[in-house]
Amino acid sequence: MIAQAIECHGRIDILLANAGIYVPGDIVDNDPADWDQMISLNVNSVFRSVRAVLSGMSERRSGDIIVTSSISGHQALHWEPVYSASKHAIEALSNALRYELYPFGIHTILIQPGYIVTNIQSTAMDLAQTYQEKFKTGPYAKIYASYLGNATSTRARSKTTPEDCARIMLKAIEAPRPKARYDVTPLATFAKLAKWALTDSAADRMIRRRYGIKREN
């Protein structure tokens, strides 16, 4: 696809790596095949896409590489450990690319949304059909129920749309000196500040209280 775009237009000035997939479930429930699928799409495809455009951008000494991360890149959660791992990997990759590509005038920019209602949520539940019985009767059933309730209510309150996210991306593209990261939702901004202000222990207590995670006897 990238080769066809270059053949048609002569060059690629902007790469937007936005594809992502999410299969819910804890480590003990997620099938290794789902791990492979999420890492392949969420991380490996970004790596390959970046490599495919770098030659031309480096020669021209210009270009924008924009990667969509997530609030999960700041705060890993139960129920989505593999997705969180993929987004932490994207954060690390983008951080390294900023240094690597600086000499060539190429900008590496992270877009960091929180909850935005898209089809990723419904697709995730479709992909997790094989886990439905574990969600209801397994050892993590209470945690799953709490997470689903909280996530559903949080998304319902979210007023941020995909169009809002697109406007942030356009702002980054048009900026002569773009920031390294752009938050899209208030929740993403809060997560970043909380990560900076709280110790790991304090953050863990906050998450446990929110989702009703208790140590069993």
Image (cartoon, rainbow, N blue to C red):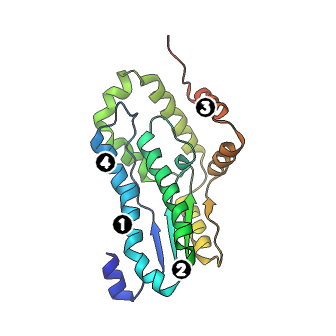
Disc 4 crowd rating (10 Å Cα; few below 14, some 14-19, many 20+) is few
Dot 1 or dot 4, earlier in sequence:
4
Residue highlighted by disc 2: 104
- x and y, in percent, of residue 174 in the image: 61, 77
Q: Give the amino acid type for the residue marked by disc 2 in the picture.
A: Phe
Dot 2 or dot 3, earlier in sequence:
2
Q: Any mark on residue 90, and which?
A: none
In contact (CB < 8 Å): disc 4 and disc 3? no
- x and y, in percent, of residue 90 in the image: 48, 56
Residue highlighted by disc 4: 36
In this picture, is 121 found above or below 66? above
Dot 2 or dot 1, earlier in sequence:
1
Q: Any mark on residue 204, and which?
A: 3
Residue occupying the far top of the picture = 217
Q: Is residue 27 left or right of residue 75?
A: left
Residue 115 visible in image: no
Q: Nearer the viewer, residue 176 or 50?
A: 50
Residue 112 visible in image: yes
Residue highlighted by disc 1: 48
Q: Is residue 36 left or right of residue 183?
A: left
Q: Nearer the viewer, mark 2 or mark 1?
A: 2
Q: Residue at x 58, y 28 (%)?
A: 208
**Element at label 1:** helix
**Element at label 3:** helix
Q: Give the amino acid type for the residue marked by disc 1 in the picture.
A: Arg
Dot 2 or dot 4, earlier in sequence:
4
In contact (CB < 8 Å): disc 1 and disc 3? no
In this picture, is 160 found above or below 135? below
Q: Marks 2/3: CA distance?
A: 41 Å
To which quarter of the image does residue 160 belong? Answer: bottom right
